[in-house]
Image (cartoon, rainbow, N blue to C red):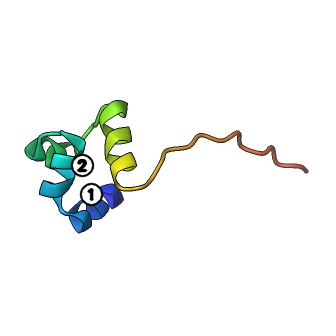
Amino acid sequence: MALRDIAESKGMTALSKKTKLNRENMYRMLSDKGNPQLSSLTTILESAGLRLAVQVRQPHLA
């Protein structure tokens, strides 16, 4: 939902044109029941100046 807020702040129509993704589909995939493909998610993140990163979690030392 945070990504939808970011997309709406950038303008969903403008973001749709920039990413070449259908605007209605973007609303659907960014809804609380949405399930975007990784490629669509990455495209939206990149166009918003963001990136997705995976990091190794540091083990807890006891």
Q: Is residue 30 left or right of residue 2?
A: left
Hey, which residue is sitting farthest left in the picture?
24
Q: Does residue 51 sit above or below 56 in this rendering?
A: below
Q: Quadrant of residue 22?
A: top left
**Label 2 Cα neighbours within 10 Å, binned few <14 / some 14-19 / many ≥20:** some
Marks 1/2 in contact by CB < 8 Å: the verdict is: yes
**Label 1 Cα neighbours within 10 Å, binned few <14 / some 14-19 / many ≥20:** some
Q: Element type at marker 2?
A: loop
Hey, which residue is sitting farthest front in the picture?
18
Residue occupying image coordinates x 25% and y 64%: 10
Query: Where residue 4 is drawn, which disc sits there?
Result: 1
Image coordinates for residue 47, horizontal then vertical, percent: 33, 50
Q: Does residue 42 sit above or below 12 in this rendering?
A: above
Hey, which residue is sitting farthest bottom in the picture?
9
Amino acid type, residue under disc 1 in the picture: Arg
Q: Quadrant of residue 37?
A: top left
Image coordinates for residue 51, horizontal then vertical, percent: 48, 48
Image coordinates for residue 52, horizontal then vertical, percent: 49, 44
Viewer-side residue, 58 vs 27 = 27
Identify the residue under disc 2.
30
Q: Earlier in the sequence, mark 1 or mark 2?
A: 1
Residue occupying image coordinates x 27% and y 57%: 4
